[in-house]
Structures are given as C-alpha cells and as structure tokens.
Amino acid sequence: MRGTAVVVGGGLGGLTAAVALRRVGWRVTVLERAPEFGEVGAGIGVMPNALRALDALGLGDAVRREGTPRLPGGVLDHRGRALGHLDEDGLDRLGRLVAIHRADLHRVLRSALPADSLVTSADVVEVEPAVRYLVDGEPVELEADLVVAADGIASRVRSTLWPDAPEPVYAGTTAWRAVVDHDGPLEIGQTLGPGTEFGVLPLAAGRVYWYAATLSPAGLRADDELAEVKRLVDGWHDPIPALLAATDPESVLRHDVHELASPLPTYVRGRVALLGDSAHAMTPFLGQGACQAIEDGVVLAAACADGATVAEALARYDRERRPRTQAVARASRLMGRAGHGLRNPVAVAARNALLRAVPAKVAVSGMARFSAWRPPVLVARPPSPSAPPA
Ligand SMILES: Cc1cc2nc3c(=O)[nH]c(=O)nc-3n(C[C@H](O)[C@H](O)[C@H](O)COP(=O)(O)OP(=O)(O)OC[C@H]3O[C@@H](n4cnc5c(N)ncnc54)[C@H](O)[C@@H]3O)c2cc1C
C-alpha cells in the first residue's frame, strides 16, 4: 500500500519515520514546531539494533562515517576499578554501536528527505478530522491517509486522543550532558558511584560526549551547572576531572529525566500512530530511547508497505512495537535503579561485587537482549503516482 502521511515532529523519531515511509513509496510531510530543524548539543550511542534499522534505510554507512565505531570499554567504580569490561571479542559478538553527535545524526536523516517535505514553524494543534497546524498564528489544513505523532514526551496528539493516558512522571534523576574537545585515546566508559553515574563516549573529530546522572528532587537548578557536576564527582578517576576542566560551562545541558511510567494500552487510534517518545518515553539508562524511535519508524514503514489498509498496517505496528518498547523501558528503569539509583554504601558494594563476578560472556548476552534486534526488509518503491503531492 502507498499513500500520504503527515509526521508531527521532526526529532530523530519523526525524521526516521519520514525517511522510511518515503522509501516504501509514501508521500510524506514533516511538520515541526521549532523554527529550525536540529538536535541538542549532545552525543548519542546508536546501538547495533538502531544501526541495523538505519542500514535498512540505506543510511547506516553515512552514520558510521559521521560517528566513531564502538571502542572497547566498560563499567568502573568511582575510583576507576573495573566492574566489567567489553573487549574486541565481546564487541564482535554484540555488534558495534556508533557514537555520534545528535546534530550529525539528525543531519544524515534530513539529507535523505527533499527540502519541500520539511516544514518548520508549523505547530500542529489537531490531527482529527484533518491535520491542522498554525503558521504565525494562521491555521493551515492538510489531508493525510496516515498521521505519525512523533511529537515527543509531552505529545499534544497523545494527550488529545489518549485522554485517559497518565502524564509522564519524573523518574527521580537529573542529568547533565556536554560535548568537549579532547586529544588522545579514550575508552567508552560508565562509572558508577554512590547515587551518581558518569559516562564517556568518544565521538568523531576529537570530540567527547560526557553525561552525569544523579538522584535528585525535581526542578533544582544551579547558577553554574558545571560546578555542580564537578562537586558531585569530586575525586573520581581520570579522565573525568580533565573532561570537566575542558568543558565550556555554557555548553552544559541539564534535564530532569521524565518517562511514561504507565505503559499505553495501544499506540494507534484510527489513522494515527504514536511513535518514539510520544508512545514510550523511557529513562536513558540503557541508551535506547532514540534507538527505539528509530526502530519504530522502520517497522511502521514495513507495516504500511505490506498492509492492505492503514488499519491493518497500524494493528501490526502496534503488535510488533508495544511489547518490545515497553520491555526496553522497564529494563532501562531497572538499570537506573541498580546503577546510580543505589546510594547506600552496603548496597553499592554488593552491586559492585556482583558485577565483578559476572563472566564477560554472560554480560555480553545480557546486553544482546535488546541490541540483537533485526529490522524488517524495506523494499524501496517510487512514490505513489496517484497520491497528490504533499
Ligand atoms: C538526558 C538524556 C539522555 C539521553 N540519551 C540517550 C541515548 O544515549 N541514546 C538514546 O537512544 N536515547 C537517549 N535519550 C532519549 C532520546 O533523547 C529520546 O528518546 C529521543 O530523542 C526521542 O525522539 P522523538 O523524535 O520521539 O522525540 P523528540 O526528540 O522530543 O522530538 C519531538 C519533536 O516534535 C516537535 N513537536 C512537539 N510538539 C509539536 C507540535 N505540536 N507540532 C509540531 N512539532 C511538534 C518538537 O519540537 C520536537 O522537534 C536521552 C534522553 C535524555 C533526556
């Protein structure tokens, strides 16, 4: 089946869905509220599962070129002692992630879409019965066979069409992120200290992405966020002090982590599909939020290509995506609890002893639980000649 689709939201999820639907012959318009397309100044690990999804779109190699292939690395305690290590052999079995700046990943996705399919400053206010959006306060209407609501964790489409769905909740953690220039080799690393964790992800072109996460009441802000991070990880092992010393205080992003803690009973309604954070906003502790949004886009397009009707396609999309994304969200929450969520010294020591005792092979198969996913095949088709231009 081919037809017309409107994608609400031009984040990583919305753009992936647009590229995937276009690939199977759909005419797609992306409506983005912001005046420009872009992503925050932070890095992201494109996990092997999401990389395979991007390969299915013909974009995997462009992402590999813009990013850095996964390096060996592991989990450490705050003094720098290894709790677990992933060597070359483990990496080969797991599949390599690509560490990339979000803006670069977003650009790769955008490059696969014609400029006239991307509309900015378009604030979507309604998707039923027609898609209605405001440009400079003036309403514009658009017909579509399919609406993809990729409008993020605070999705207006979800709160309108899923009025009974509980709102996202604070997950108890606040997180800081920054990208810095750094010379010299670095491993990928996650350091678990009491109540706080710190992660390092080397990107391309001598840049390094770091993040810190800590248990905190919601809504706290510091005048100097970088100083706050330095205080939290004071005395932690190298290269953490050097990375923080090299960080421009103005570049530090801070977000309280929210999630859709009550899983939705369905991701679809009529011709509307929720996708990405609007459907399953999860904590970032498995590094899978955007990766799941990327998977969503490819599965949605496969279902639309194969389905006889939009209803049939969306039923398949919901069937295939809901159990998996909700399982990933649960596991991510648990990962946070067992990571920086432990503050008590006895619990931290017990967790660390357990991590040290887990054989590398067992750790790799645990990690493969989600990253072994493979996308459906997308057969490229030209745009539907019968469909009106978007
Ligand atoms: C601290 C932190 C670290 C993270 N780290 C990782 C990681 O390492 N790996 C990973 O995979 N994920 C990570 N994530 C999760 C990831 O950022 C999200 O899952 C992902 O960005 C969701 O993409 P999306 O396209 O669904 O939503 P969004 O990126 O939120 O995009 C939604 C878009 O919709 C637009 N929009 C909203 N409303 C409207 C409207 N009414 N009309 C038009 N446009 C609208 C918005 O402007 C926005 O551009 C992290 C999240 C956080 C908070």
Image (cartoon, rainbow, N blue to C red):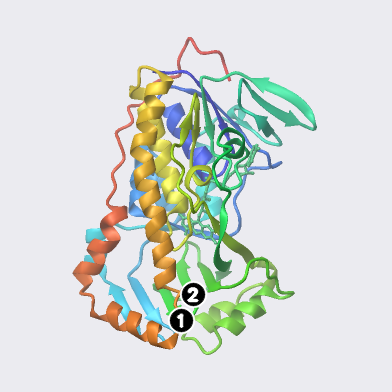
Residue situated furthest front in the rendering: 164
The residues bearing labels 2 and 1 have C-alpha atoms spaced at a distance of 8 Å
In-front residue for pair 285/215: 215
Going from N to C along the chain, the mark reached first, 2 or 1, is: 1
In the rendered image of this protein, does residue 319 appear above or below residue 193? above
Residue at 57% x, 56% y: name it: 169
The x and y percentages for residue 167 are 58, 49
Mark 2 or 1, closer to the camera: 1
Please name the amino acid that badge 1 sits on.
Answer: Gly
Please name the amino acid that badge 2 sits on.
Answer: Phe
Residue at 46% x, 81% y: name it: 193
Q: How many numbered dots are placed on residues in this image?
A: 2
| Callout 2: SS | strand
The x and y percentages for residue 244 are 58, 78
Determine whether label 2 and label 1 are within 8 Å by CB.
yes
In-front residue for pair 28/320: 320
The x and y percentages for residue 158 are 57, 38
Which image quadrant for residue 144?
top right
Answer left or right for 74 relative to 201.
left
Residue at 57% x, 69% y: name it: 180
Residue at 31% x, 54% y: name it: 371
- Which residue is tagged 2? 198
| Callout 1: SS | strand
The quarter of the image holding the C terminus is top right
In the rendered image of this protein, does residue 48 appear above or below residue 2? below
Task: Inspect this view and state whether residue 185 appears.
Answer: no
- Which residue is tagged 1? 193
Which image quadrant for residue 139?
top right
